[in-house]
């Protein structure tokens, strides 16, 4: 595990997304499906919400650029209540830092 530093939850969601996209490309992925519990980030990537926060705009733009490296991509929202295992694993990784 690695620390992303001190970030807002939305900045951390974008940073984690960017790390995941980088890993997918490194592994030779051509298509990617993104499942996130951040409704804000999902809706922004879908174009349903505008990116208003000045600290999120560059992260959003970097994510959109990274997505162009894939022939296809899909993003979907996973409600936090249905994401308990991933949340527990993330907390366990943070506790081990």
Image: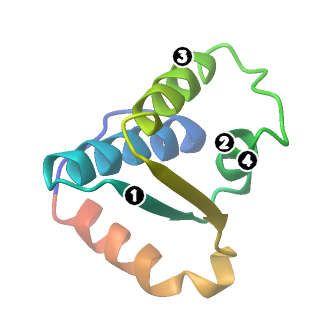
Q: CA distance from mark 2 to mark 4?
A: 9 Å
Q: Secondary structure at mark 1?
A: strand
59 and 66: which is toward the camera: 66
Q: Nearer the viewer, mark 2 or mark 3?
A: 2
The picture places residue 58, in percent across and down from the top left corner, at 54, 16
Q: Earlier along the polypeptide chain: callout 2 or callout 1?
A: 1
The picture places residue 36, in percent across and down from the top left corner, at 56, 63
Q: Nearer the viewer, mark 2 or mark 4?
A: 2
Residue assigned mark 1: 31
Q: Nearer the viewer, mark 3 or mark 1?
A: 1
Residue assigned mark 2: 45
**On residue 58, which mark appears?**
3
Q: Secondary structure at mark 4?
A: helix
Q: Earlier along the polypeptide chain: callout 1 or callout 4?
A: 1
**On residue 40, which mark appears?**
4
- Is residue 7 rendered to the left or right of residue 97? right
Q: CA distance from mark 2 to mark 3?
A: 13 Å
Query: Which residue is most to the front?
Result: 71
Please give the name of the residue rendered at 32% of the width and 53% of the height, measured from the top-left corner: 30
Q: Secondary structure at mark 3?
A: helix
Q: Nearer the viewer, mark 1 or mark 4?
A: 1
Please give the name of the residue rendered at 42% of the width and 77% of the height, measured from the top-left corner: 86
Within-10-Å neighbours for mark 3: few <14, some 14–19, many 20+: few
Q: Earlier along the polypeptide chain: callout 2 or callout 3?
A: 2
The picture places residue 78, in percent across and down from the top left corner, at 64, 74
Q: Secondary structure at mark 2?
A: helix
Within-10-Å neighbours for mark 4: few <14, some 14–19, many 20+: some
Please give the name of the residue rendered at 43% of the width and 47% of the height, measured from the top-left corner: 71
Q: CA distance from mark 1 to mark 4?
A: 22 Å
Within-10-Å neighbours for mark 2: few <14, some 14–19, many 20+: many
Q: CA distance from mark 3 to mark 4?
A: 15 Å
């Amino acid at each position: 595990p690695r620390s992303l530093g001190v970030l807002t939850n939305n900045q951390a969601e974008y940073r984690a997304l960017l790390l995941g996209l980088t890993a997918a490309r490194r592994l030779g992925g051509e298509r990617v499906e993104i499942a996130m519990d951040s409704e804000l980030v999902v809706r922004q990537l879908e174009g349903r919400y505008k990116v208003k926060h000045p600290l999120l705009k560059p992260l959003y733009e970097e994510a959109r650029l990274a997505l162009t490296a894939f022939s296809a991509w899909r993003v979907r929202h996973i409600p936090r209540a249905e994401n308990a295992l991933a949340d527990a694993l993330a907390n366990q990784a943070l506790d081990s830092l």
